[in-house]
Image: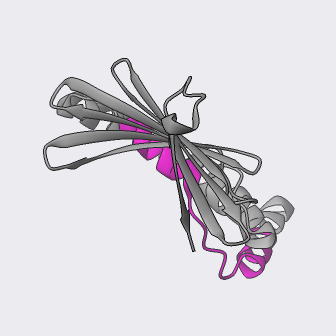
């Protein structure tokens, strides 16, 4: 009886202390994404049932709510939500597969563009969130173009060049204020 009373008391204290603690539920979303990546709809349905019977969703939601969302509530950061994200979207018949990765003050976005099943090009953007400076590299087959955006006192200076272009004529620069 003492164990049940202690467990109920702990649950009530947790409910009172976690009041208003609504976070990203990042762990539960990642489990859901794993299930969503199963290609066959019948197999995906089977995995969903398995995740419900073996309480994968329930445990991930509980851990999210009690641990990670509480950390996010008090610190402002969710440790599961940080790091990497991957998604895709389509526009005008092209599909863009995007991979975002954060490491310290640096963010790296990689955009792979496809038309149907045909690979077209890759754009990689490295952005320093602290300084605001960024470097982007566009690869189309054997062609490579590099863009650089640097904050300056007068605004943002954007430079475009092809690697190996050492002469000033091989670079184009613009200043945006």
Residue at (54% x, 28% y) in the render: 165
Q: Is residue 146 visible?
A: no
Q: Position of residue 163 (x, y in %)?
A: 54, 26
> Which quadrant is home to the N terminus?
bottom right
Say which of 23 and 134 sits in front.
134
Q: Is residue 47 left or right of 74 when viewed as pictured? A: left
The coloring applied to the image is one colour
Q: Position of residue 138 (x, y in %)?
A: 43, 35
**2 vs 31: above or below:** below
Q: Where residue 58 appears, x then y in whole percent?
A: 52, 51
The C terminus sits in image quarter: bottom right
Of 11 and 99, which appears nearest the observer? Answer: 99
Q: Nearer the viewer, residue 132 or 110?
A: 132
Q: Which residues are magenta?
A: 10-35
**Residue 172 in the image, given as x and y percentages of width and height:** 49, 46
Give me the residue at 67% from left, 54% from top: 133
Examine the rendered structure and indicate whether residue 15 appears above or below residue 149: below
**Residue in the image at 56% along x and 59% along y:** 25
């Amino acid at each position: 009886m003492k164990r049940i009373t202690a467990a109920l008391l702990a649950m009530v204290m947790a409910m009172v202390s976690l009041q208003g603690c609504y976070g990203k539920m990042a762990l539960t979303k990642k489990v859901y994404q794993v299930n969503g990546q199963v290609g066959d709809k019948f197999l995906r349905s089977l995995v969903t049932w398995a995740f419900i019977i073996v309480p994968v969703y329930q445990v991930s939601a509980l851990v999210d709510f009690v641990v990670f969302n509480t950390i996010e509530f008090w610190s402002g950061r969710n440790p599961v939500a940080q790091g990497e994200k991957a998604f895709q979207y389509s526009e005008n018949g092209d599909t863009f597969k995007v991979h975002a990765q954060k490491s310290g003050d640096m963010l790296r976005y990689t955009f792979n563009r496809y038309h149907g099943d045909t690979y077209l090009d890759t754009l990689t953007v490295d952005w320093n969130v602290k300084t605001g400076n960024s470097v982007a590299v566009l690869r189309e087959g054997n062609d490579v173009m590099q863009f650089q955006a640097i904050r300056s006192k007068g605004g943002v200076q954007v430079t475009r060049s092809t690697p190996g272009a050492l002469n000033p004529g091989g670079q184009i620069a613009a200043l945006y204020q």
